[in-house]
Structures are given as structure tokens and as C-alpha cells.
């Protein structure tokens, strides 16, 4: 079932991990899992202290060459009537620092209280929200109200 954009956005914000899809100037795709937060209507993510194979991350090079990106969150259960996904399409920028983005990420992820992301920061201005669910029984954000942030 197609999801309304407002429902898709609210459900997206509750996810703990997303997949960021970028493409280089020739259109070659690249997909990576990312932590993220909402900053107003923008999706933000940052390069953090988790080990990386290189500091020159492909996602950052791709965004510089081609700012069009997609970010996907999904939910899977063996009960397929509870499946859902939300995709946010938009235009990304890379900044060396973005205090609002870092604050939003730190508020969402407790490990960042000890080691805040140093950046760079990816800020995505969303142009389109799309969502789908297998049934109308999609968990709504209000069903997460009593959960600690790491379980939302």
C-alpha cells in the first residue's frame, strides 16, 4: 500500500539506520549504511569515528560529482503483512562542519555523546518522500512513544 508522504517522513525519522545511495558522474551506483537524523526537513549524516578503509570516502566524492541521492529505511519481519519501506530522494551537499547536524545526530545516538562525529557532514534537502507498506497496520511513530530512543 502506498504511504502518504507525511506518514512516510514520520516513520523514516524513527529508523536507526538508513542506506544512502549515491552515484558518480558516470552514474555508477554506490550504497552504504549510515546513521542519520532529521534537522527540520533535511536528512543529515556525518562521517564518524567508526573505522573506515579510507578518509576519502566514495559517498563524499560521489555527492561532489552528482548531488542527487536516495536514502532508504525499511522494516522486515517474518510476518510479511508488517513489511514497509520509506525512501527519501533529494539533493545532498557536503560540509566540513555543521553544528546543527552534529547536535541532531548526538541527540539521536547515545554513543555520539562520548565521541561526536567529526565530519564531514552530509545534508540532504529532500524533494520527494515515498513509502510502501504490505498492509495498513504499519507501526506509526506514536506507537514508539514509550520506547527509549535506541528502540524507536
Image (spheres, grey):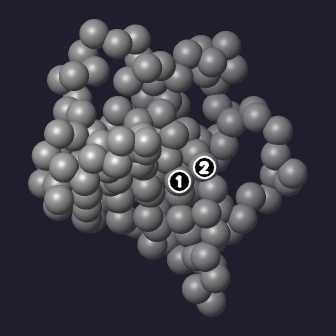
Q: Write the residue at 75% across / 33% down.
A: 49
Q: Which mark is residue 84?
A: none
> What residue did someone put label 2 on?
33
Q: Nearer the viewer, residue 34 or 62?
A: 34
Identify the image quadrant of residue 107: top left
Q: Position of residue 121 (x, y in %)?
A: 57, 46
Identify the image quadrant of residue 63: bottom right
Q: Position of residue 134 (x, y in %)?
A: 25, 53
Q: Secondary structure at mark 2?
A: strand
State how far apart marks 1 and 2 are (Cα): 4 Å
Above or below — where is 150 with respect to 79? above
Q: Write the residue at 81% across / 52% down.
A: 55
Q: Nearer the viewer, residue 61 or 7?
A: 7
Above or below — where is 116 with respect to 118? above
Q: Position of residue 148 (x, y in %)?
A: 40, 11
Q: Nearer the viewer, residue 88 or 40?
A: 88
Q: Nearer the viewer, residue 123 or 28?
A: 28
Q: Residues within 10 Å of mark 2 (few under 14, many from 20)?
A: few
Q: Is residue 45 left or right of residue 9?
A: right
Q: Are marks 1 and 2 in contact (CB under 8 Å)?
A: yes
Q: Position of residue 53 (x, y in %)?
A: 87, 51
Q: Is residue 73 visible?
A: yes
Q: Secondary structure at mark 1?
A: strand
> What residue did someone put label 1 on?
19
Q: Residues within 10 Å of mark 1 (few under 14, many from 20)?
A: some
Q: Is residue 42 visible?
A: no
Q: Quadrant of the N terminus?
A: bottom left
Q: Write the residue at 43% across / 55% down.
A: 72
Amino acid at each position: 500500500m502506498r504511504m502518504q508522504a507525511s506518514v512516510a517522513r514520520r516513520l523514516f525519522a524513527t529508523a536507526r539506520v538508513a542506506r544512502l545511495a549515491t552515484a558518480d558522474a558516470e552514474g555508477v551506483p554506490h550504497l552504504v549504511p549510515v546513521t542519520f537524523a532529521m534537522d527540520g526537513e533535511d536528512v543529515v549524516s556525518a562521517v564518524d569515528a567508526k573505522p573506515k578503509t579510507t578518509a576519502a570516502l566514495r559517498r563524499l566524492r560521489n555527492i561532489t560529482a552528482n548531488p542527487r541521492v536516495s536514502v532508504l529505511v525499511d522494516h522486515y519481519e517474518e510476518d510479511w503483512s508488517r513489511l514497509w519501506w520509506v525512501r527519501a530522494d533529494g539533493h545532498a551537499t557536503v560540509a566540513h562542519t555543521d553544528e546543527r547536524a552534529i547536535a541532531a545526530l548526538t541527540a539521536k545516538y547515545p554513543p555520539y555523546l562520548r565521541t561526536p562525529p567529526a565530519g564531514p557532514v552530509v545534508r540532504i534537502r529532500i524533494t520527494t518522500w515515498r513509502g510502501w507498506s504490505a498492509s495498513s497496520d504499519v507501526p506509526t511513530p506514536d506507537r514508539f512513544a514509550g520506547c527509549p530512543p535506541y528502540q524507536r
